[in-house]
Amino acid sequence: MALVKIPLNTQYLSLYIEHDKGMVFHHIKQSLYQLPAVSIAFLLAIDEGLTEQRALNEVSTQSNLSEDQIISFYQTVKELFTTAKDELNYLDGRYPELNNVLDGDNHQPLPKATTYQVANSSFAISCQCSQLMSLIQDELSPCAKTLDNVDFQIEIDIQNHAQIETQIEAQSESQSETQVEPKGNNLFCIYSNDQLFAAKLKFDQVLPLIIDRLQILAFQKSDYYFCFHGAAIHTTKGTLLLPGKSGAGKSTLSAALANLKTNETPNQLYSDEIIAFDQHFNLITLTLPIAVKSGSWQVLEQHYPELNNVHVWHRQDGRLLKYVWPKHFAVPPEPLEPSEPSHQLASIEQQNANKFVLVNPNYQNAPQAPNNHKALINQNRLNKFAERASINPNAQAETLSVIDTIAMLTDGGYQLGVELTEEKLDLLISFITKIKCCKLSYDSTETALSLLESLWPKQ
Amino acid sequence: MDNNNQPLSKIDASNTTNVKLNDTELKATELNEAQQTRRDFMTKYGKLAAVTPVALTALMSPKTSAAPKSCKPQQGNKHCDGTAGFTGFE
């Protein structure tokens, strides 16, 4: 059953139904909710003006569930029927440095800063530690650009040891648990346009946070409508979107794909972390390196031999990272003139560029070899098991409904650059309805790449 | 269906004696059809109803909109450090 919109009596609610699930958009709260079947039934009942008792009685009769089992659903749905507005809107809480706009001479890069351009945002990065600055310059050199003025000044300062120890002593008096910092190592803090955004960082923790910050700030300035956590790669067959939570396999797949060709033409990366669409569903390119977690170093070495030599960085949760640069970044299409119809595209390749396939990666570790309890593992048995694992029936693509796709996209992390209205929501729904959406379960990058090939619409 | 739950008559284009519906009657017909659609769906989803863990899940709201790599609580990003002094991407 395709997604259908059900007209309601309640003007500030819009209901969408697909199979046994539903979504309701609250126009005043600018919020979208997912509903199971029982909540849909109650929403329709309340919208029709049924009393609580009658609604409970009817749904109970139809579902064979007791009123006690379903009354909480009724009460929750009933709370939607309010015209009270929430305090926040989508444009609140933007990154503080966006409100701390540089003016006058502050636009000029600080002495000894290196300047960078990412999308249509510019950055000057300076650091009190020359060794760290040298490493940062090496890692970010492909996006370095000589600039006289910048949007953001990123300053990496060495935190004062005496101050840190005083802070720790003050913390230990008020809290039962205290993190004791290792002595003898510098700790760093990072400012963006004079706003402190990270502190007490070890040497190897700095660059990952810098790159994360650049990724976020770079698209904030654009005219994006929707932003989701994930990778996007342009190929001659179309654009592949890989949304999903951290650790799902996006960066590994996108790194592998970015190094491959389709129809003898190199694939091009938009970003390995940020899928940011404008109102025409054009993607924004963020020229920043791909973060490769330690579990994927061996897999990706065939594509990126430099993985053997680059610096190992640390996430604050202890995960290890290395950074690699794809060979090619996607060049966004020229913006359409207002009078130019969108169907007048120059070539078939341009037309293909508008085709999307959305794949939610679900990497699952290959089944472990059976434990033989005693010392040596039987290599023959291990090989046979590995062979069976490579044809694991779980390596498959499962089609996602529109509602499941939206739930997956938002669960992985999202940001809206505009206030959410019914019109904008319908724009997103219309886009998702037109493209292929699936969840890809796999146990190796090679399996995933060959499955991805089969997902493109036949020409 | 009309207000008496009787099926609406099909309009026979060849029968020139059919009376054309005016705008008010057309709107009333559409409203009745919409009402019946809602009732049909209410019955359908009542039958499909099963107890699920959550009655309502917020998918998008101003409270949960935040850059994907930021340190908002609901994102559960592992790299975020909750210790004092770390402002994260707030």
Image (cartoon, rainbow, N blue to C red):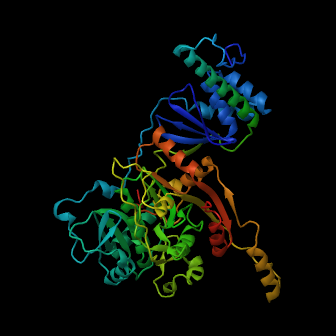
**Which of the pair A169/A256 is nearer the observer?**
A256
Residue A241 horizontal/vertical position (percent): 54, 61
Quadrant that contains the C terminus of chain A: bottom right
- Residue A376 vertical placement versus A141 (above, below): below
Does residue A220 appear to the left or right of A408 in the view shown? left
Does residue A186 appear to the left or right of A432 in the view shown? left
Q: Residue at x 48, y 38 (%)?
A: A422
Q: Residue at x 71, y 27 (%)?
A: A56
- Residue A155 vertical placement versus A428 (above, below): below
Q: Quadrant of residue A254?
A: bottom right
Residue A185 horizontal/vertical position (percent): 40, 81
- Residue A132 vertical placement versus A262 (above, below): below
**Which of the pair A253/A199 is nearer the observer?**
A253
As drawn, the residue found furthest toward the left would be A104
Does residue A329 appear to the left or right of A34 in the view shown? left
Does residue A430 appear to the left or right of B2 in the view shown? left
